[in-house]
Amino acid sequence: METLNAWLGQLNGLVWGPPMLVLILGTGAFLMLGLRLMPLRRLGDGFRVLWRGRQASGQGDITPFNALMTSLSATIGTGNIAGVATAIALGGPGALFWMWCTALVGMATKYAEAVLAVEYREVDALGNHVGGPMYYIKNGLGKRWRWLGALFAVFGAIAGFGIGNGVQANSVADVLNRALDVPESMTGVIMAVLAGLVLVGGIRRIARVAGALVPLMALAYVGGGLLVLALHAGEIPAALSLVFEHAFTPIAASGGFAGAAVWAAVRFGVARGIFSNEAGLGSAPIAHAAAATRDPIRQGMVAMLGTFIDTLVICTITGLVIVVSGAWTRGESGAALSSTAFEQALPGVGGWIVTFGLAIFAFTTLLGWSVYGERCVEYLFGERSILPFRLLWVVAVPVGAVMKLDFIWLLADTMNALMAIPNLVALLLLSPVVFRLTRAYFHADRGL
């Protein structure tokens, strides 16, 4: 196990080195400029399209609204609570700034992913609309690039068991054990049973569950975070000053905080930002490909809201609560740090907000990622692989619940980067298609 940990650590340092950060941020910036800042200029239009997307308006399996909720169910999870805390614990408050940068350009990335996913999607033998990076690589770039699509599907299937299964199950088991003394194995079994009951209904049932749980829990968590910030409104300017200052200057050790260089703030801010909002990973377009929509641009506008909501709203609230409370200097990390910060600000209540928020977010993430992993496996092995995959997914839940968290985080972090590479290459090569479709849509001045 130690050898595997050491090997993964070396690979992680390589794939999350400067070239990867440049590729992620550079691709997002290139797409944002190519779109002439449309994701930022049309943010309000995106929310209007989302509201109207509660009803199907074209061919597809789920409503545009539920497609976003399925995507958000996979993105709003441990990354928003434990991931943000880990980034600040390792990179200092400046890491939050780099998470914002990742999200701002990530809106363009997520938009492009969804546009291509709907444009190049297929209907499988079971009548389901399937799409994502492997399909827009195959259908958009041609046969000679099919190996790249297969590579994404392999990384996506493996990553699902890390970021989408093991990390989520382990985080829930850990937080419930700390808060309620529930054995990790019991939590794992209960989550496996609940997941199995939902997975039987496929993406349609998952989308319905996500459409009900995600908005409710997100509003509850955001409400609790805003209450904390309202009670500490006078300290917010100083907290923001720390964030901007230490995004570009090293921060010295303080209390239990070991100190951090600027590179640590950049690396952990970008890595945890991507872990949270998944812009560039290529996971979210798999869900958006199933949307019942009449135009890929409309679904792209819905998709870009996922990054905005996930990082610029929810992650920002978590990060500011941690910095405002001063809990980040105590040497804690992960969900424990977020829980400490909320409990310190709202004694007797704050810790429970984090506990139940993390449990529900992580469970919905586990459901959302089951869709991603299933589609990747289906692409590689056909429709007959769906049932075996679902069974394996359910069995993996209790296993992940009792494994060492450090190893699972390392595996998930590494697989994130490996997934992103084929997808980002495809986005750059297919960017002229995204720009052309966008220009044609808005030039025609279609109603939103």
Image: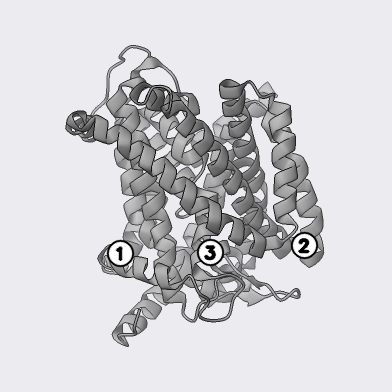
- Left or right of 357, for residue 201: right
Quarter assignment of residue 81: top left
Secondary element at tag 1: helix
Mark 3 vs mark 2: which is more N-terminal?
3
Write the residue at 57% across / 27% down: 175
- Label 1, label 2: how far apart the Cα atoms are: 39 Å
The quarter of the picture where the C terminus appears is bottom left
Write the residue at 31% across / 24% down: 325
Write the residue at 73% across / 30% down: 186
What's the residue type where badge 2 is placed?
Phe
Which residue in the structure is indicated by mark 3? 66
- Numbered tag placed on residue 141 in the rendering: none
The quarter of the picture where the N terminus appears is top right
What's the residue type where badge 3 is placed?
Asn
Q: Nearer the viewer, mark 3 or mark 2?
A: 3
What's the residue type where badge 1 is placed?
Leu
Q: Position of residue 410 (x, y in %)?
A: 57, 33
Whether residue 288 is visible to the viewer of this picture, yes or no, is yes
Quarter assignment of residue 165: top right
Which residue in the structure is indicated by mark 1? 43
Mark 1 residue crowding within 10 angstroms, few (<14) / some (14–19) / many (20+): some
Which residue in the structure is indicated by mark 2? 381
Determine contact: label 1, label 3, CB under 8 Å.
Answer: no
- Label 1, label 3: how far apart the Cα atoms are: 19 Å
